[in-house]
Image: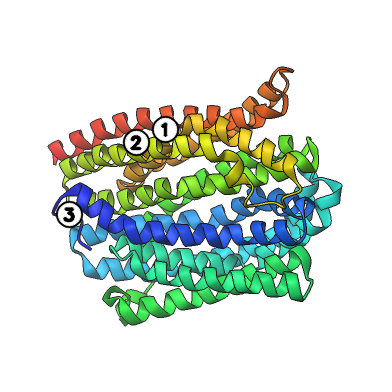
């Protein structure tokens, strides 16, 4: 899909629909472990998986920023109409996405236990959490390969192929979860093992379809040569994104440390609300990715007015979604939380529903983060990636400790702090957009 011509709203929506469906299946894929484990085992098992979320996100983030960076560079070459550079970028990013995850995966496997200990993982959940995290670390290469293929395809305007892979993987993961947990009695480890198998097949299928269907993956010998300049461009954008994602993950670890201190109930409630909020994030994430491709192509084509138009239309779409989601969470919080735990575990449902009502007050700031990040990623603004990560780290390592220390707030400070950090990051993102818009206007005027 060429996004350098035509209505910005129409292009963003057309591109977003398959991506949104894909994100829904991605979340079903992520939620399957929690729902099945919660219903078949119990809240201690949920707490075990929840205790690994921020840590696994950190390890994945180190690799996935590179894939995103490669996708941004590819979209800019596509906007320029430079087919040779597009193919060379696909090949050279692929080299990085094989070597880097192998190293990170091996290191993360051995660090899993010490990090969970450092985060004060509840004793009743520690053994299962360690097994689950170690298993996910072994599948890091497969996650990275899938994200690499998806980033390249989306940069070229193809959001459907990654969707097909996700649907297949999601169905398979749910099936394997049930088999390993209910019938083979493999517990939390079975959920992790099912995830790794699904990730492996997802990576294989995505690469197979990319090389078979997409003409830009028809690489010739000259495209396979190592290109230092394209590698440099990819890493120039990819490393700050990895740094941003990893800083966010580290900040989540700081919050997880506070959560773990309140025991298995708070950990289970926090895990449940986090998974529900991942669903809330989906349309924002979809809009983010669509804007990154839209702005990347138009920035490469030197159409700055369309980049700015993308921002305005993106903010409008984001605001409409936020107005729809807020009352749903406020009214149906208990019903939504109840999907994830056994009926008799009413304490988790009550705590989770109240927590969702708190964080929903800040959805507009959350949407602003994703919308602006898509624009800035598309134009290759590496500084914002670091700035955004630093803001989240400072916020999550200070605000939760301050708010939970106030007797009148207590444990609820966990979720109030989430909203405060979203607010800080959203305001920072908007400020950075204004600066970048001014700079790129000058850049194109001078050229």
Give the distance between the C-alpha atoms of the residues marked 2 and 3, in whole angstroms: 24 Å
Q: Which residue is mark 1?
A: 364
Circle 2 Cα neighbour tier, 10 Å, few/some/many (<14 / 14–19 / ≥20): some
Q: Quadrant of residue 267?
A: top right
Circle 3 Cα neighbour tier, 10 Å, few/some/many (<14 / 14–19 / ≥20): many
Element under disc 3: loop
Side (left or right) of 362 relative to 344: left
In the image, residue 350 sits, relative to residue 172, either above or below, namely above
Residue at 56% of width from left, 42% of height from top? 248
Residue at 41% of width from left, 42% of height from top? 370
Element under disc 1: helix
Side (left or right) of 27 relative to 270: left
Please report contact status of discs 2 and 1: CB closer than 8 Å, yes or no: yes
Residue closest to the eye, 421 or 90: 421
From this viewpoint, is residue 383 visible? no
Give the distance between the C-alpha atoms of the residues marked 3 and 1, in whole angstroms: 28 Å
The first of marks 2 and 3 along the sequence is 3
Q: Which residue is mark 3?
A: 4
Numbered tag placed on residue 131 in the rendering: none
Image location of residue 260, percent across then percent down: 76, 40
From this viewpoint, is residue 324 visible? yes
Quadrant location of the C terminus?
top left
Give the distance between the C-alpha atoms of the residues marked 2 and 1, in whole angstroms: 7 Å
The colour scheme used to paint the residues is rainbow
């Amino acid at each position: 899909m060429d996004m350098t011509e035509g209505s910005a709203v129409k292009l963003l929506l057309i591109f977003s629909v398959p991506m949104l469906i894909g994100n829904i299946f991605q979340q079903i894929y992520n939620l399957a472990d929690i729902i099945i484990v919660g219903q078949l085992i119990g809240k201690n098992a949920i707490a075990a998986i929840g205790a690994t979320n921020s840590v696994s996100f950190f390890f994945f983030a180190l690799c996935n920023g590179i894939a995103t960076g490669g996708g941004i560079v590819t979209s800019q070459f596509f906007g320029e109409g430079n087919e040779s550079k597009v193919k060379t970028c696909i090949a050279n990013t692929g080299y990085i996405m094989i070597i880097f995850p192998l190293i990170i995966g091996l290191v993360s496997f051995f660090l899993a236990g010490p990090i969970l200990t450092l985060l004060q993982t509840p004793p009743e959940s520690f053994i299962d959490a360690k097994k689950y995290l170690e298993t996910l670390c072994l599948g890091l290469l497969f996650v990275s390969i899938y994200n690499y293929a998806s980033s390249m395809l989306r940069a070229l305007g193809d959001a459907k192929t990654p969707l097909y892979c996700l649907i297949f993987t999601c169905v398979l993961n749910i099936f394997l979860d049930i088999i390993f947990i209910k019938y083979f009695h493999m517990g939390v480890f079975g959920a992790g093992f099912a995830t790794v198998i699904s990730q492996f097949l997802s990576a294989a299928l995505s690469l197979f379809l990319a090389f078979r269907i997409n003409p830009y993956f028809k690489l010739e010998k000259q495209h396979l040569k190592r290109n230092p300049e394209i590698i440099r461009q990819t890493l120039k954008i990819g490393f700050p994104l990895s740094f941003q994602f990893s800083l966010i993950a580290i900040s989540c670890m700081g919050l997880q440390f506070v959560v773990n201190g309140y025991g298995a109930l708070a950990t289970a409630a926090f895990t449940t609300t986090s998974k529900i909020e991942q669903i809330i994030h989906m349309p924002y994430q979809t809009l983010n990715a669509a804007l990154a491709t839209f702005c990347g192509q138009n920035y490469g084509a030197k159409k700055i007015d369309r980049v700015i138009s993308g921002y305005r239309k993106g903010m409008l779409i984001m605001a409409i979604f936020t107005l729809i989601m807020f009352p749903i969470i406020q009214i149906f919080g208990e019903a939504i939380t109840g999907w994830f735990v056994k009926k008799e575990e009413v304490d988790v449902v009550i705590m989770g529903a109240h927590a969702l009502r708190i964080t929903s007050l800040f959805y507009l700031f959350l949407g602003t983060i994703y919308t602006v990040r898509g624009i800035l990623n598309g134009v290759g603004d590496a500084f914002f990636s670091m700035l955004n990560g630093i803001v989240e780290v400072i916020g999550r390592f200070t605000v939760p400790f301050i708010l939970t220390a106030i007797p009148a707030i207590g444990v609820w400070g966990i979720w109030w702090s989430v909203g405060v950090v979203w607010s800080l990051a959203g305001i920072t993102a908007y400020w950075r957009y204004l600066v970048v818009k001014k700079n790129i206007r000058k850049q194109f005027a001078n050229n």
